[in-house]
Image (tube, grey):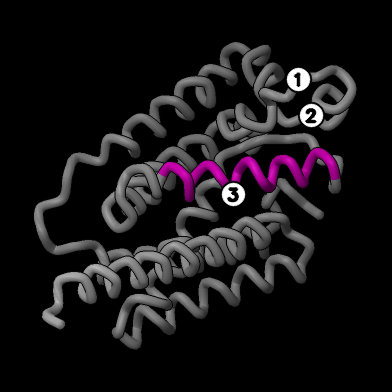
């Protein structure tokens, strides 16, 4: 399974997902005044600083990147977490990824709330990095697993909670892209499908809580 996402089909399909995500986001972001996206700013700084510094100090990237051998045989388990800040696609890709992080996390924070956005951002990255280490034995790093997971969680929310046809069509198309990437052997498709599944689950739980609240306040 390819974890780099650097093939031309993978790049084009990611752009398609990004467009679908933006189309959904502008239709489901709450119209009320939105809080300052604290989590998005923290994510950009926490990931961006080491991501950019590694181009001047390569040792930073070497210390953070995913490494099956160093993780399994030398106990460097922190790499499962820090791989999110180790960019392996070059400077231009790192800068582009920071823009994606800012957009994805800000939208996630507004539609999910802060703690859910954090969970939906970090969980796909941790899961995929674990699989990459123990199953695919792939080195590397980057924030794309987290980005893909959070963006597709928003798509999952739109699929379940929105009554707008365009939102549901775009959400279904984004999930289909995830399936296509899996068929093509791109690990980012797995991150997308995991994010979509989590988004659908969280959306259903939110709806269930809303129904319970209505039941509590409704007259007998």
**Prevailing SS of the magenta stretch:** helix
Pointer 2: residues within 10 angstroms few (<14), some, or many (20+)?
A: many
Q: Is residue 140 left or right of residue 116?
A: right
Residue at left 16%, top 50%?
34
Q: Are marks 3 and 2 in contact (CB under 8 Å)?
A: no
Is residue 96 shown to the viewer in this render?
yes
Pointer 1: residues within 10 angstroms few (<14), some, or many (20+)?
A: some
Residue found at the far front of this picture: 220
Q: Earlier in the sequence, mark 3 or mark 1?
A: 1
Q: Position of residue 79 (x, y in %)?
A: 69, 26
Q: Nearer the viewer, mark 2 or mark 1?
A: 1
Which residue is under mark 1?
A: 76
Q: Position of residue 12 (x, y in %)?
A: 58, 64
Q: Nearer the viewer, mark 3 or mark 2?
A: 3
Quarter of the figure that contains the N terminus: bottom right
Residue found at the far bottom of this picture: 165
Q: Quadrant of residue 148?
A: bottom right
Residue 128 falls inside the magenta stretch: yes
In the rendering, which numbered label is found on residue 67?
2
Q: Are marks 2 and 1 in contact (CB under 8 Å)?
A: yes
Q: Earlier in the sequence, mark 2 or mark 1?
A: 2
Question: How far is the residue under mark 3 from the one under mark 2?
Answer: 18 Å
Q: Is residue 105 left or right of residue 4?
A: left
The correct choice, above or below, for 146 with respect to 159 in the image is above
Q: Is residue 218 left or right of residue 112?
A: left
What range of the chain is rendered magenta? 118-134
In the rendering, which numbered label is found on residue 124?
3
Q: Quadrant of residue 101?
A: top left
The correct choice, above or below, for 7 with respect to 48 in the image is below
Q: Earlier in the sequence, mark 3 or mark 2?
A: 2
């Amino acid at each position: 399974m390819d974890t780099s996402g650097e093939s031309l089909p993978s790049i084009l399909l990611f752009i398609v997902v990004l467009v679908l995500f933006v189309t959904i986001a502008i239709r489901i972001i709450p119209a009320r005044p939105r809080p300052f996206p604290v989590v998005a700013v923290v994510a950009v700084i926490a990931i961006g600083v080491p991501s950019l510094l590694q181009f001047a100090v390569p040792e930073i990237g070497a210390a953070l990147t995913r490494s099956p051998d160093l993780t399994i045989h030398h106990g460097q388990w922190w790499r499962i977490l820090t791989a999110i800040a180790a960019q392996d696609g070059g400077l231009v890709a790192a800068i582009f990824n920071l823009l994606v992080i800012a957009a994805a996390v800000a939208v996630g924070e507004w539609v999910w709330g802060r703690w859910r956005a954090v969970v939906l951002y970090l969980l796909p990255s941790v899961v995929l990095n674990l699989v990459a280490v123990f199953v695919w034995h792939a080195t590397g790093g980057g924030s794309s697993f987290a980005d893909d997971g959070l963006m597709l969680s928003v798509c999952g929310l739109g699929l379940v909670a929105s009554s707008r046809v365009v939102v549901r069509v775009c959400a279904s198309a984004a999930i289909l892209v995830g399936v296509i990437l899996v068929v093509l052997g791109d690990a980012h498709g797995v991150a997308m499908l995991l994010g979509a599944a989590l988004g659908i689950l969280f959306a259903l739980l939110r709806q269930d809580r809303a129904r319970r609240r209505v039941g509590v306040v409704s007259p007998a």
